[in-house]
Image: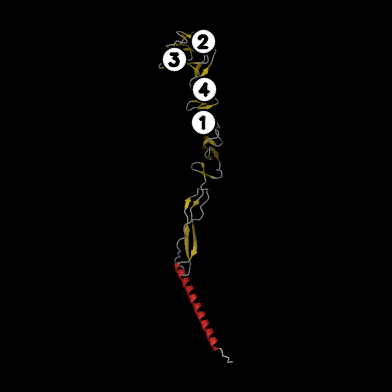
């Protein structure tokens, strides 16, 4: 163990602790050392440096540091400033009673590392802190970033909602608000062939159909698809032939009637008496 022997004045009139077997500055001391020895390293430090005992195998060697290593805090005094180890549950600390980061399994709350968080706060395993979460949130990574909501609420953009906002719909399996999907359909096809149903009269008209495909089906609350098939009446080829024959027949009858009317006129003219002058 290092033994103090006296307190003397340094070059700048500050108090410096001297140890047995110490050498003055300049005899192979590390930076920041006021005195040192080959066996024990730094024995005292210059002003504004912290004295820290580090392990060197199974031995401890003194070193002088401008700031204390992680897991330690600096304690200043008129004679010597030292690095003191934080409490066992603190990974780093500002002072003896104020932790700044905790070891895994503990959560920072008001400068202390707790094994669990008080009511209203969430144990954040990533930050190792007790975090105040948004309303309805069970787990969050910040005040406004929820990662898990209560079982009766839906998650959306880091917030918890009783109902989903417009444009979104609830996914009851994931308990999330997901975007609504509206139906999308393609263009109409050309009209199909004219077909007459069976068991109908000869003069019954047929039907022709056209369709369009669904490109994207709607979600549960999205706009439904419009009709994807249209049917209209049409004339079958057989009906068209009948109509053509009718039109042809009508033209023949009209022509025959016209001929008969012309012949009758000629006969009437021929029967008129001739007046002699």
How far, Cα to Cα, is label 4 from label 2? 27 Å
Give the position of the N terminus as an image quadrant.
Answer: top left
The structure residue drawn at horizontal position 52% and vertical position 23%, both measured from the top left corner, is 99
- Disc number lying in front (3 or 1): 3
Numbered disc in front, either 4 or 3 = 3
Residue at 45 percent of width and 67 percent of height: 237
Mark linked to residue 269: none
- The CA span between labels 4 and 3 is 23 Å
Instruction: Return the residue at label 1.
Output: 123
Q: Earlier in the sequence, mark 2 or mark 3?
A: 2
Q: How crowded is mark 1: few (under 14 residues within 10 Å), some or many (20 or more)?
A: many
Distance, label 2 to label 3, CA atoms, is 18 Å
Q: Position of residue 277 (x, y in %)?
A: 59, 92
Query: Foreground mark, 4 or 2?
Result: 2
Q: Which sits earlier in the primary sequence, circle 1 or circle 4?
A: 4
**Residue marked by disc 2:** 16
Q: Toward the viewer: 68 or 263?
A: 263
Picture coordinates of residue 140, whole percent (x, y):
52, 34
Does residue 69 sit above or below 207 in this rendering? above
Q: Residues within 10 Å of mark 2 (few under 14, many from 20)?
A: many
Query: For this rendering, which residue is in front, 143 or 64?
Result: 64
Of labels 1 and 2, the one closer to you: 2
View extreme (left): residue: 57
| Residue behind mark 3 | 61
Here the colouring is: secondary structure
Q: Looking at the image, is mark 1 or mark 4 nearer the viewer?
A: 4
- Which residue carries the number 4 mark? 93
């Amino acid at each position: 163990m290092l033994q103090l022997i006296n307190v003397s004045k340094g070059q700048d009139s500050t108090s410096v602790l001297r140890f047995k077997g110490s050498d003055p500055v300049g005899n192979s001391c590390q930076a920041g050392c006021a005195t040192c020895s080959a066996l024990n390293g730094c024995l005292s430090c210059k002003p504004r440096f912290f004295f820290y005992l580090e392990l060197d195998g199974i031995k401890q060697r003194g070193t002088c540091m401008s700031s204390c290593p992680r897991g330690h805090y600096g304690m200043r005094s008129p004679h010597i400033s030292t690095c003191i180890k934080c409490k066992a549950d603190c990974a780093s600390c500002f002072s003896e009673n104020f932790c700044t980061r905790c070891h895994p399994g503990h959560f920072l709350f008001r400068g202390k590392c707790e094994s669990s968080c008080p009511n209203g706060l969430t144990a954040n395993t990533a930050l190792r802190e007790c975090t105040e979460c948004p309303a309805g949130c069970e787990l969050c990574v910040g005040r406004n970033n929820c990662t898990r909501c209560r079982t009766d609420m839906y998650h959306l953009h880091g917030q918890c909602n009783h109902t989903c906002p417009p444009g979104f719909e609830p996914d009851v399996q994931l308990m999330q608000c997901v975007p609504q999907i509206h139906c999308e359909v393609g263009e109409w096809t050309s009209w199909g062939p004219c077909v007459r149903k069976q068991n109908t009269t000869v003069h019954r008209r047929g039907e022709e159909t056209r369709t369009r495909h669904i490109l994207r089906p709607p979600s549960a609350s999205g706009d439904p698809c419009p009709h994807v098939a249209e049917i209209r009446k049409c004339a079958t080829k057989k009906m068209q032939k009948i109509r053509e024959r009718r039109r042809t027949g009508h033209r023949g009858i009209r022509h025959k009637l016209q001929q008969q009317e012309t012949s009758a006129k000629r006969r009437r003219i021929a029967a008129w008496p001739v007046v002699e002058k």
